[in-house]
Image: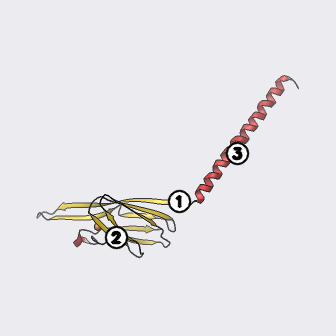
Amino acid sequence: MNVKSINKNWIMYLGILLVIILGWYVYSSMASGESSSNEEKTYVINMVTGEFKSETADGKEIEAYRWDPGTIFVPEGEKVQLRIYGVNGEEHPFIIEGTDIKGTVKKGEETVLNLRFNEEGIYRLICLTHPDIKSNGPMIAYIVVD
Ligand SMILES: [Cu+2]
């Protein structure tokens, strides 16, 4: 073995060592990614209260309070956090039909609901103050669980 071939071997060993270190690094970062996905993921959905206002031809003012967005999609059986910020309207007491979930959204405040729907279907988020046209609604949002 001359000096040149020793140098070549040395570079080859260094290359192999580098590949092993890189491989270990990639593997360990993948493994830690796996362990963090074992922690249950929470889906955060943001909503606000809004208001539509208009005037009819005969000068009558009409308005409707709304949840915005009016339709949300929620994965069945997963942890979901619904955060509703009150923008328009002083107060919106609400229920989610078919559940025992209820609360109130107040102007300038964020109402945070931690939810989990174990049965698919369409659930209605209904404001009890504005449930229909007569009461300046319908303030109803549709939670689609699938
Ligand atoms: Cu309302």
Residue reaching furthest to the right:
1
Q: Residue furthest top?
A: 3
| CB contact under 8 Å: marks 2 and 1 | no
Q: Amino acid at mark 3?
A: Trp
> Crowding near pointer 1: few (<14 within 10 Å), some, many (20+)?
few
Q: Could you tell me how far apart the alpha carbons at marks 3 and 2 are, in whole angstroms?
A: 53 Å
Q: Which residue is mark 3?
A: 24
Compared to residue 94, the image places residue 2 above or below, namely: above
Residue 7: horizontal and vertical position, in percent? 80, 26
Disc nearest the viewer among 3 and 2: 2
Q: Position of residue 100 (x, y in %)?
A: 41, 75
Amino acid under label 2?
Phe
Residue 86 disc label: none
Q: Is the CB of mark 3 within 8 Å of ligand 1?
A: no
Left or right of 11: which side holds 122? left
**Residue at image x 72%, y 37%?**
18
Q: Residues within 10 Å of mark 3 (few under 14, many from 20)?
A: few
